[in-house]
Each structure stands twice: as C-alpha cells, then as structure tokens.
Amino acid sequence: MLYLLLLVSYVVAGSIYQTPLVKIESMRMEMIRKGTWAEFVKKKNAMRASLVSNANQTVFPHPIYDYQDTEYLAKITIGTPGQSFHVVLDTGSANLWIPDNICVNGRRGACRITTCDRGLVCEVLCHDKSCCEDDVDNPDEDNPCKGKSGFDSTQSTSYAKITPKKYFEIVYGTGFAKGFLGNDTVRFGEEGNNKTLVVLGTVFGQAVQIGDPFANNPINGILGLGFRGLAQAGVTPPLQRAIDLKLVDPIFTVYMKQLGAKAKGQDGGAFTYGGLDSVNCGQEIAYVDLTRPLYWQFKMEAFSAGHLSIRKGWEVISDTGTSFMGVPTAIADLVADSYGGQYDEMFEIYTVDCNATVTFEMTIGGKQYKIERKNLVLEEDKDSCMIAMTPLSSVGFGPQWILGAPFIRQYRNIHDMRNNTIGFAEPK
C-alpha cells in the first residue's frame, strides 16, 4: 500500500540528530583502477565456497552482503573518552562491531605465558583475566586488521565487561568478523557535537579476527541499522537501544550525495536520526509497507530499462552498504544487452559504452521511480565504463533485488520503524 505524506505535516516528538557521511572510493573501483580486481575475484569466490562448506550452527550467516562496493562511511566514537572509528552505516544488518585492539596488535607480552594459554587454563590460572579475551597471536604482514584503529577497553572509563563472556561470529558473503561482546557508550558522530546521538550502555562486538576482504581499506567496522530480529548473538542494535531509551523517535532519513565513483574524502551526505531531513528532502514522501521487517524489504511491482519492460513483482531491499544495484542475473543480462553492454566474467562487471544513456525505471507502491544515468554509469577510465549493477543468483527466499546507492542517491530514503514502512522523497 502506498501512503503519501507532506513533509511539513510530519511532526516528531523527540530530538533529532545527524551523522555526516564521508565519500570514499569503493574497494571494487580502486582495485579495478589498480589492476588487482580480477585476482581478488578469484580469492573471493574461493573464500565464499570455503565459508559455505565450513559453516555450522554456531556461525551466523549473513548471505547477501559484501562491503567491497561501499562508498560512504561515517565517524562514530565509542567509550569515554571517545575512540573514533569510520564505519559503514548499514541498513542490511543490525550489529555494531569494530576491531578490538587485540586484532590490531596481537596478544600482549604479559599474556604470552603458559598460565594464560587460551581456554579454561587462562580462566583459572592467569593473573590478568583480560588475557583470556585475546584470541590471536602477534599480527603478521597479512593481518587484515593491520593499519586499522583498534578499540582499547582499558582506556575507557565507561566500559563494562559482559559476564559471563559472550561471543559473536558473523559470516558475510566474502568474509567474516568474530570476537566477543562489550558494553560502552556509543556516539553516532563526533564527541562533544550537539548533533551527535549518544547512547549509553550499548552492546557491541569487539572483533579479534576479521576476514581478508576488510584489509587495506578504510572500513573500520559495521554499524547495522536493521531491525532487532536481524541482530546476531541476541543483542539490541544501537539505534534500537536509543529508541528504547526514548532518545529519538523510531525514524531515520538517509541522504547520499552524487559525487562520482572516484571521489574521496568529500562530504557525502548524512543520516538523520529521530525525524526527517527537512533540508534535503522534498515536500512529498511516498511510503510503502515493509513485507519483512527484519531488512528494509518491500515489494517492487515492475521494472524497465531501455527496450526491456517486466511486470512480475519482486521482494527488494534498500541497502546503504553497497554502491551497486543487485539485479537478478537473468534480468541484469537483458539490461546490459538492451544498452549494448556485456558481462565481463573475469571482473564480474557489466561493461557498457561510456555514451550509453542507461536509465532504470521501477514501480513501487504504484508509483514510478527513475534512476538517471549519472547514478548508473561508472567510468573506469576515459574509454571504459560499467553499469552500477551486479548479478544476484536466486536462492528462493529473501530479497531478490538490492537497491543500493544509485537508488538512494536519486531518492531520499525515510525509514519508519514504528509503522514498518519506508518512504521515498525527491531531493530538494
């Protein structure tokens, strides 16, 4: 069902906070530019096969998402005083995790004694019980945490250990993060800024190991903005905790700037918590019901691109964690063909002539939404371009499409957790 509301008529009771976004070049685009993407694709596919074959009931699979296409990061701070991390604000997951200091620096010298060996020996005999949290040896040159910021709980006066100790492990499409849970103050932005949402007593993951795909990029953790039921290890997501504490109303707005795939370090937009982004949203918002309030998932009735037009009905999600549109493989192939493009299997991209006027039109809640060429055609170099589209294999359940940054740049996304709806507004 479609709901139309005017921005001026939407009143919220709580405070409104905002987190700025920073635009980065996605790992995919950077590696394509450097000529290392094809090799990464081989490793990625081998890793994906390994993760599937080795999975067991203690591992929580997160099957849809990779973060190699992330283009927007936000700064958060954890602890007192605050320790800063640039994280992905991800509507497709619901956990917050950051690298622990252990992941970055390895086991401390004081922990490298037999009475502090991992397991029961450590719990019983080790004088320094913090050693029992160490889960990796000294990092080597290939450690994915190398160069990242690590959280040091000993430097935070507001940190609280969780007893008995609880662990988490999240498996992504091409990687993983695992470690233990801690409790501290989380700020959605800079410490001391009156626009920063501050959430005391937040449970978050302290990763002691992360997968290779997180290496050599500026991603320093994931902050999930999905629903409580999607969270792993039974934790309350940070934003949901803020809502439970009545710090904000259960609504947030996403605004992403269109800056080009290679832009780095620029102002990339903002997430607004507790209300609407009245500065960047147009007056009319069209809301649709969520079909599965775990993800931000809803129905799309029809799709067209070039001479292609399909009216079938699909489950789709809005996902802030990817810079591409996830499209069912058969449809993606037809889209590329419609614009004279083709699939490059080695690079797993759809190439297209740089002058192609690629546009997508989608029908959601009976209303048409057009994504313009500027948000869909990415330039590899002056003579080579690609469509911001990646093929998705059908697995028979869950979302069939992923509406990533091309859609979110075109339309402001308003996430209403009280009414289980999502709204779309033209930019101002």
Image (cartoon, rainbow, N blue to C red):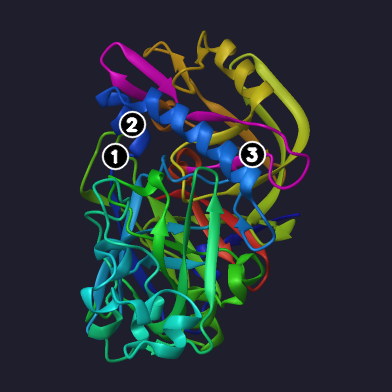
Q: Tag 1's secondary structure?
A: loop
Foreground: disc 3 or disc 2 = 2
State the separation of the CA atoms marked 1 and 2. 7 Å
Does residue 335 show up magenta in the picture? no
Q: Tag 3's secondary structure?
A: strand
Residue range (magenta):
378-404
In the rendering, which numbered label is found on residue 401? Answer: 3
Disc 3 residue type (three-letter) = Trp
Disc 1 residue type (three-letter) = Glu
In the visual, does 244 lie left or right of 2?
left
Q: Are marks 1 and 2 in contact (CB under 8 Å)?
A: yes
Q: Are marks 3 and 2 in contact (CB under 8 Å)?
A: no
State the separation of the CA atoms marked 3 and 2. 21 Å
State the separation of the CA atoms marked 3 and 1. 23 Å
Up the image or down, 379 lies above or below 300; here it is above
Callout 1 crowding tier (Cα within 10 Å): few <14, some 14–19, many ≥20? many
Q: Residue at x 37, y 33 (%)?
A: 28
Nearer the observer, 167 or 156: 167
In the rendering, which numbered label is found on residue 25? Answer: 1
Residue for badge 2: 29
Q: Tag 2's secondary structure?
A: helix
Residue 183 in percent (x, y) is at 43, 84
